[in-house]
Amino acid sequence: MDGMTRGIDTGDASTARVEELVTRFREIGNAQVADLPIYNDKLTVEAVGFRPLDRSALFGVLITPWFMNAVVLPREKKDLDDAALGRAAIVTLPAGPTKFRIGGDDVVGTFQSLSIHSPMSAFSFQEAARVEAEKTLASLLAPPEDEDTTAVRIGSRARTGFDNRPSAISPRQAQRIGQEIRLWSHSSGNTLTTKDSVAMRWKSSSL
């Protein structure tokens, strides 16, 4: 196991699937996002704590230099449904029902994500991001202390990490990213408008 995966508790085939996810986001970062203001070059792409969620899916946290998401990754690649991108999907976790968003691309296939942080400017080194990922993962995998505590509320609290200030991304830069942007904008619950002639603006989706 190399440095791009951490604390992975899966079989060989599932480990390869997680590594495929990490490799894909590294490609996206290096080729499409590295020169944008949202990219934190002090961080790298890393999968944290992926484990079986059920017989058909894996669950863990994905750290990138521009976002951190909890991810439900099918063990087998599922073809991408463009019409489903960005839609809500309720995932049953030990902490309770949690609202995720559907994302993916033609390489990785469909997956579901819950936003934790975006952008990642709050983290000045990888270990700090990893600690936050492990903390959030533990919260999502812990049964609620009482009947009124649900994972949906945990997800809402995690979303307070979003920075809603305008991002200094030019229309030309956003256009260059093109279709790749959907891989993380839909799954993060963020929208990056690429057709406006004004500066791009981040906005988080409300639960």
Image (cartoon, rainbow, N blue to C red):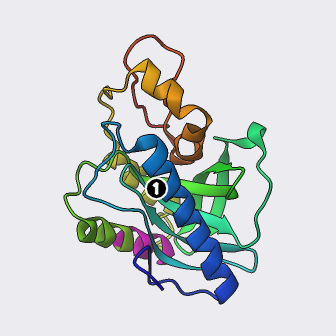
Q: Which residue is drawn at 66% across and 80% down?
A: 14
Question: Extreme top residue here?
Answer: 197
Q: Quick one: 184 or 142, which is closer to the camera?
A: 184
Question: Extreme left residue here?
Answer: 124
Q: Where is residue 130 in the image (x, y as percent from the top left)?
A: 32, 70
Q: Which residue is drawn at 30% across and 65% down?
A: 129
Q: What stretch is highlighted in magenta?
A: 135-143
Res 187 seen here: yes
Res 52 seen here: no
Element carrying mark 1: helix
Based on the displayed image, in which of its 4 quarters is residue 19 positioned? bottom right
Q: Position of residue 40 (x, y in %)?
A: 29, 50
- Left/right placement of residue 162 relative to residue 99 reads left
Q: Position of residue 41 (x, y in %)?
A: 28, 53
The secondary structure making up most of the magenta span is helix
Q: Which amino acid does label 1 sit on?
A: Gly
Q: Mark 1 points at which residue?
A: 155
- Is residue 99 a member of the stretch shown in magenta? no
